[in-house]
Amino acid sequence: MSLNEAKGYRVSGLTREQQEEAEAEIYGRRYRKETPQMPPQPLSAEEYARMRELLAAHDAQNKTGYQEFDLNNPPTPPYVYREYPKLMYDHKNRCYLQVEDAQGMEAALAKGWKKEPWLDQVAEPEPLLDAESQDGADAAQEKINEARHAKREKVGR
């Protein structure tokens, strides 16, 4: 028997009305028997106008309300430019330093730090084979391709 299956249900000795009354007590609601409801009285135009005024005053006081937004794209504050902190660069040791104000930047410049980042100069990779060896490798690859092609034709693919 799996954990989700109950072995059996207890049968309550209460009537349906008693069960509703007990449930109302559990959830803190007063139990009241159904009473016949009176039909609503028609309102006059003045009463409608007064209700609209009350609602407008209520809405003006409680402007916070609910704001809908997309959880995948939440609202972000607008960007505000700040001059500092900045990064200073040491080209020789390939490291950087964060400065918090103009005095820190002047001190870093005096010590030899630079404002511009170092440029990565990537050298072209050297060829693995010289021209003669490359020609031989190309010829060998061509033979392999021809053999594969012949094998496929023989099998009938």
Image (cartoon, grey):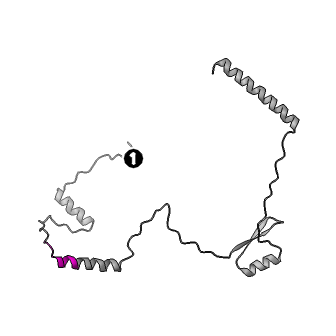
Q: Nearer the viewer, residue 6 or 114?
A: 114
51 to the left or right of 156: left
Q: Which residue is painted at 37% across and 47% down in the image?
A: 4
Point out the stretch of residues depicted in magenta: 42-49
26 to the left or right of 72: left
Question: Dividing the image into 4 quarters, which one contains the N terminus?
Answer: top left
In this view, the residue farthest toward the top is 154
| Residue 132 percent across, percent down from the top left | 88, 35
- Name the kind of residue labelled 1 in the image: Leu
Question: Dividing the image into 4 quarters, which one contains the C terminus?
Answer: top right
Q: Nearer the viewer, residue 33 or 84?
A: 84
Q: Main secondary structure of the magenta part?
A: helix
| Residue 5 percent across, percent down from the top left | 35, 46
Q: Which residue is painted at 77% across and 28% down in the image?
A: 142
Quarter of the image holding residue 63?
A: bottom left
Residue matched to label 1: 3
Height in image: 83 above or below 95?
Answer: below
In this view, the residue farthest toward the bottom is 103
